[in-house]
Image (spheres, rainbow, N blue to C red):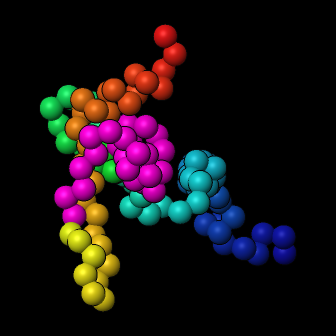
Amino acid sequence: MENSQPEEIRKIDLKKVGYDIYNLLKSSGRRGYKHRARQCYVELKQDTLYTPGQVAALLNVSYDSAVRLMLKMKGCVDMGTETRRYKRRKRMLRLSGKNLMVFLRSKTRE
């Protein structure tokens, strides 16, 4: 009577259980586009214009924090649309790699 359950129900795939536990511990909440933007690898070059997502990945901050930082940085260009009646403004921020390097050097101790 003790072994009334079928064999396949009693066996547990420990590899899958361990993988699931690892993914739960590794994840930290939401997985939206802002988080994915921060996880990508970006190489810093002087002659490139960077988007807020790429700046977030370089500085390891959130997308919203990158937008706030970019607005304060010297040389940030907003190529978006203007606010019109009943339409909100669209932002399209770009920052050159040269200005981003200057910002990073100002934040380091020498």
Q: Is residue 68 magenta?
A: yes
Residue at image point 23% right, 71% down: 82
Between 33 and 58, the one nearer to me in the picture: 58
The answer to whether 86 is drawn above or below residue 11 in the figure is: below
In percent of width and height, residue 62 lies at 48, 51
The answer to whether 102 is drawn above or below residue 34 in the figure is: above
Residue at image point 69% right, 64% down: 10
In percent of width and height, residue 7 lies at 65, 66
Residue at image point 58% right, 60% down: 29
In percent of width and height, residue 56 lies at 40, 45
Q: Give left or right: position of 18 versus 62.
A: right
The answer to whether 99 is drawn above or below residue 89 in the figure is: above
Please provide the residue range marked out in magenta. 55-80
Q: Looking at the rendering, which quadrant does residue 5 occupy?
A: bottom right
Looking at the image, which residue sits at the far bottom?
Answer: 86
The answer to whether 47 is drawn above or below residue 6 in the figure is: above
Q: Looking at the rendering, which quadrant does residue 78 occupy?
A: bottom left
Looking at the image, which residue sits at the far right?
Answer: 1
Q: Looking at the rendering, which quadrant does residue 91 occupy?
A: bottom left
